[in-house]
Image: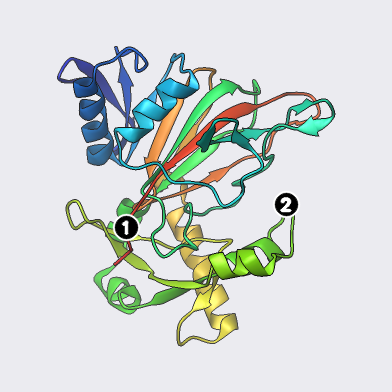
Amino acid sequence: MTNHNGLQIKELKPGFGAEVSGVDVAKASDETHKDLVNVFHTHGAMLIRGQTMAPDDLMRFISAFGEPEGHTQKQFTLPGYPAIFTLSNKKENGKPIGAHNDGVGWHTDYSYKEKPVMNTMLYSLEVPPVGGDTLLADCVAAYDALSDERKAQLDDLVLHHSYKYFMETREFGRAKLSEEMIRDNPDVFHPLIRTHPADGRKALWVSTGTVRGIVGMEDEAAAKLIEELVEFVTQEQFVYRHKWQPGDILTWDNRCTLHTGSLFEDEKYERHIHRMWVKGDKPY
């Protein structure tokens, strides 16, 4: 346990992430929020348990990280708070109140955008007692574990990301996009090895879902390499598994991690989580 300006900090796993205690985020000063942002940038992910956050509190805190990002899907944003998205299997008057099974499969958020989101923040209101975990993979540690020869083979590769491809092939809730959605979400191309703008550390920034292929590589060979690299990045030694409690705030840096949700007995248990994003920069 270490101390950072009065904040008690311990690693989520060796060399990755920080769990912060001794702070009431809703009541904390702007200066304390800045300290928390610094902890986040240093560690790549941050967990704060036992919080009570109204929507205004969430907006104040997420805004300390940067400008909140909107959502491609609008139907499950919180009324009056377009930057707060609901993840839930609950229903009201027979209608879903949130997206269910959203985010299952190793990925990084908004990778189909020219400027993917910088960080993702989740705040839990209700969680199942078992299942529904969130897993984070440390892509910097994975890159560092590669041999110099392997790094040289991967350094210049470029991934083809496609929102249209993702929506038409995903496991849960496949959908054909409207012409407007296709126009607003054109295919993009990002480096496989991403450089972090804060300190230059490199991440093995592979993903699933939105990745359609690798530029200059046959589809079959590209698919095989992507599968191989995702399997490498998501080895147990690189992964933190978060078991949720009500009142958790978990945020991670999409520039140097992959993440996935996991399933739970959704006919037996209920989940209700708020998700927020912060605008990011163009990968390089």
Q: Nearer the viewer, residue 92 or 20?
A: 92
Contact, mark 2 vs mark 1 (Cβ under 8 Å):
no
Three-letter code for the amino acid on which mark 1 is drawn = Asp
**How did the renderer colour the structure?**
rainbow
Task: Say which residue appears at 40% left-offset and 47% top-offset.
Answer: 238
Name the residue that disc number 1 marks. 281
Q: Nearer the viewer, residue 222 or 102?
A: 102
**Where residue 177 sits: x, y (%)?**
69, 64
Location of residue 45 (image quadrant): top left
Name the residue that disc number 2 marks. 172
Location of residue 150 (image quadrant): bottom left
Location of residue 283 (image quadrant): bottom left
Question: In which quadrant is the C terminus drawn?
Answer: bottom left
228 left or right, relative to 181: left
74 left or right, relative to 18: right
Nearer-N-terminus badge (2/1): 2
**Where residue 39 sits: x, y (%)?**
24, 32
Residue 106 in view of the camera: yes
Task: Say which residue appears at 18% left-offset and 58% top-offset.
Answer: 200
Task: Say which residue appears at 52% left-offset and 72% top-offset.
Answer: 187
